[in-house]
Image (spheres, helix red, strand yellow):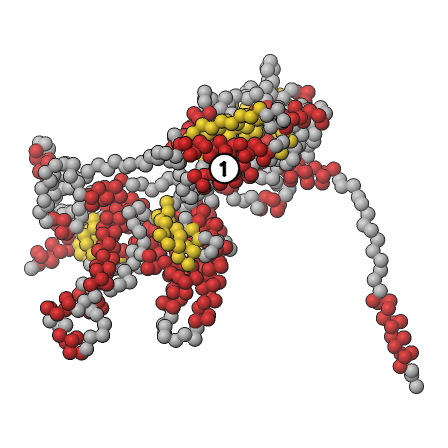
Amino acid sequence: MIDGSSLTVEMEEEESPATAIAPREPPKIQRLEESVVNRIAAGEVIQRPVSAVKELVENSLDADSSSISVVVKDGGLKLIQVSDDGHGIRRDDLPILCERHTTSKLTKYEDLFSLSSMGFRGEALASMTYVAHVTVTTITKGQIHGYRVSYRDGVMENEPKACAAVKGTQIMVENLFYNMTARRKTLQNSADDYGKIVDLLSRMAIHHNNVSFSCRKHGAVKADVHSAVSPSRLDSIRSVYGVSVAKNLMKVEVSSCDPSGCTFDMEGFISNSNYVAKKTILVLFINDRLVECSALKRAIEIVYAATLPKASKPFVYMSIILPREHVDINIHPTKKEVSLLNQEIIIEMIQSEVEVKLRNANDTRTFQEQKVEYIQSTLTSPRSDSPVSQKLSGQKTQKVPVNKMVRTDSSDPAGRLHAFLQPKPHNLPDKVSSLSVVRSSVRQRRNPKETADLSSVQELIAGVDSCCHPGLLETVRNCTYVGMADDVFALVQYNTHLYLANVVNLSKELMYQQTLRRFAHFNAIQLSDPAPLSELILLALKEEDLDPETDKNDDLKERIAEMNTELLKEKAEMLEEYFSVYIDSNGNLSQLPVILDQYTPDMDRVPEFLLCLGNDVEWEDEKSCFQGVSAAIGNFYAMHPPLLPNPSGDCIQFYTKRGESSQEKSDLEGNVEMEDNLDKDLLSDAENAWAQREWSIQHVLFPSMRLFLKPPASMASNGTFVKVASLEKLYKIFERC
């Protein structure tokens, strides 16, 4: 017989070796190879192409250059070429030029506190050689020829070769991050990186106004940054950022000579109340070094938010000069941040001076006025190419066959059947109707040239351009609006052809394309009262329900509304920055974008728009996200028929007062009592809505289509354009009769 206790002991003895955990020995500390150390350091100093450009340009400035030229290919990943006319590099210094911690700027640590140059650690060029192929061509004063040498991993690949060269130094950085696969894959968006390089050189150019800068893409003839040596900093800002920025700047100065240690001088320019922008631009130089300071930027934004309208974002340029021993410039690998002694006091003094300057300059504000020229109608004066004018000028008229005569012209601002009624004579030429002014204004507007630098948006715009149907484009550019055929189709004439055009499809496509072309550059419509997202989305869900009287799915609808509200609140920052759709932290909608001037969308469709944003947008992929949001905005701003039925025709019965008896309803057949039993307020709202839509179609949609719309090829076959008559064929029918 086996004892149970002995069995238990034997089992434990058998299991203990398997379950026992062997003690871990401490891992051995090893010395990293020098190549690994150097590559890790290079990844910290050269984070992206713009970091390399900054280091090279600062080296050129240290070389007393008066001209610096930058050429970039594929956002800097394939090529960065920086050329200057500085003092060059001696032949004897070339062997150690790209070794780590080789520099001519300092010899001991204490020299950091009296440093006046841009670079000092001797890491920039060395770091580039570990992650790219670097070639240096240089010549010094007095030499009859220059030298060219290539570097890799901090050492020369070969001896310097004599070559022809111009004064100064040219450094080529090719195949950046060729040996860092992950880093290179994250930087494939070349448009973004090139935009950062352009922004960097623009900031450098307005501070170093004694140096000329240029920056262009490889193979391009025109430079994206081109600044010449200018006598004043304001002229530099004007040449780089444009006249519209420079004319709205005010000079600001602050100085402190506190013997206790807070000593500094600040001078710069800040934007006034007439300047309008979507984001804050702070160009900050401390001891001639381009740096960032989030605390100072936040302090200035607080002043502007308290003094000027909420939508205003300032442009600020500041140059601060401090004793060199009061600045620690060695706190960041790329030197984009510095540490200041008495930083809080300095920021507070600058903030106070900016506030005083703004309040004193905010007494008056100017508004730009657009001068609108009067377009004389063909009804009041003959066209210069008309037969009458040709006879008066003595020109011989060319006979046009009757069956090819075009009776209307798109250049005529009237362009409607009822416009051929006899107009009232104008006593004075200055008395122009407001309708003509608006019409002329819309015709003279052009598409904004500035677009976002995001490659995904540029790809979407390129897709619109490539899918454009040339035949429809010619029709849209030169068609004449005749009138509305029904609630959806308008009659338009092109040459001798008459078409039915679907205004819903046309307006939807136009709004979508305009959303892409105005990306991140919208004006805004401010709602009088913020609208809660959850209630609007819930309203849209209830409108979609086929059986609204049943309330069994109300909980599900509320959960869907809450989920969509939280989603849109998460995406609020992106929606505001790129599309001017502002949603506050409480989930209230208070701002919408302006897609076409003189046009406001139907606000009854806001719930449907918000539901579409929550359900139909692919938020994870950048290109799909922008396309989805733009399509939702296009559908919302499209000129759909109003929700209230058209009061003309049989739909007038919709506006009769409810609760009438059958006898009273029969009495309504009479015209006398029909008018007395109508809901006048509701009928007036409907008439205004339909009249406003027809006005917008004639005076906003069609003039804007002629300027901006590029109709896709699908419109040729999906019923957007339907030919209903041709003058030549009609004449053949009449000839048979």
Whole-percent x, y for residue 580 in the image: 41, 48
Label 1 Cα neighbours within 10 Å, binned few <14 / some 14-19 / many ≥20: many
Outermost residue toward the bottom in this view: 1
Whole-percent x, y for residue 237 in the image: 44, 29
- Quarter of the image holding residue 668? bottom left
**Which residue lies at the image location 71% right of the left edge and 27% below the top edge?**
109
Circle 1: residue type: Ile
Q: Is 18 on the left-hand or right-hand side of 331?
A: right
**Which residue lies at the image location 37% right of the left edge and 45% below the top edge?**
523
User: Does 456 sit above or below residue 39?
Assistant: below
Whole-percent x, y for residue 501 in the image: 25, 56
Q: Quadrant of the N terminus?
A: bottom right
**Which residue lies at the image location 19% right of the left edge and 54% below the top edge?**
483
How many numbered markers are drawn? Answer: 1
- Quarter of the image holding residue 652? bottom left
Q: Is 582 on the left-hand or right-hand side of 722?
A: right
Q: Is 276 on the left-hand or right-hand side of 705?
A: right
Q: Quadrant of the C terminus?
A: bottom left
Outermost residue toward the top in this view: 142
Q: Is 528 or 607 nearer to us in this picture?
A: 528
**Which residue lies at the image location 44% right of the left edge and 68% below the top edge?**
557
- Quarter of the image holding residue 603? bottom left
Quickly name the residue at label 1: 300
Q: Is 707 or 270 nearer to us in this picture?
A: 270
Q: Is 88 or 349 nearer to us in this picture?
A: 349
Whole-percent x, y for residue 197 in the image: 52, 35
State the SS at label 1. helix
Query: Can residue 215 be seen from the camera position used here?
Result: no
Q: Is 203 or 146 nearer to us in this picture?
A: 203
Query: Can residue 594 be seen from the camera position used here?
Result: yes
Q: Is 169 on the left-hand or right-hand side of 245?
A: right
